[in-house]
Image: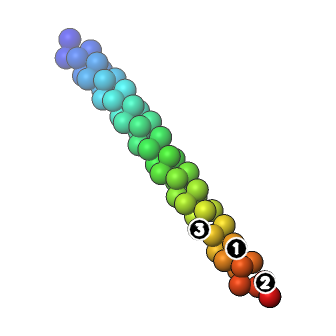
Amino acid sequence: MQLTKSIQILRALIFHLLIGFGFYFTIFNAATAETLVIGSSKSAIKIEKITVFDEP
C-alpha cells in the first residue's frame, strides 16, 4: 500500500514538473522572439540613419 502511494505522488510530481517546464520554455521562447524583433528594429533604424547621412 505504501509503495502505490509513493508511485502516485511521484507521478503527480513528474506531471507538475513537465507542465512547469512547458510554461517556462514557452515564456522563454516568447521573450527571445520579442528580443529578436527589438534587435532587428534597432538595426533597421541604424541602417536608415546611415542611408540618411550618406546622401549628399
Q: Quadrant of the N terminus?
A: top left
Dot 1: what SS?
helix
Locate residue 44, reporting x and y percent: 66, 67
Dot 3: what SS?
helix
Counting residues from the start of the chain, the first of labels 2 and 1 encountered is 1
6 lies above or below 21: above
Residue located at (33% from left, 29% from top):
16
Q: Nearer the viewer, residue 17 or 56?
A: 56
Q: Which of 15 and 49 is in front in this view?
A: 49
Where residue 47 is drawn, which disc sits there? 1
Residue located at (50% from left, 46% from top):
30
The kind of residue on which mark 3 rests is: Lys
Q: Nearer the viewer, residue 21 or 39?
A: 39
The kind of residue on which mark 2 rests is: Glu
The image quarter containing residue 52 is bottom right
Q: Distance between the residues labelled 3 and 1?
A: 9 Å
Examine the rendering and report whether any part of residue 14 can be seen: no
Where residue 55 is drawn, which disc sits there? 2
Where residue 42 is drawn, which disc sits there? 3
Residue located at (41% from left, 37% from top):
23
Which is closer to the viewer, label 2 or label 1? 2
Counting residues from the start of the chain, the first of labels 3 and 1 encountered is 3
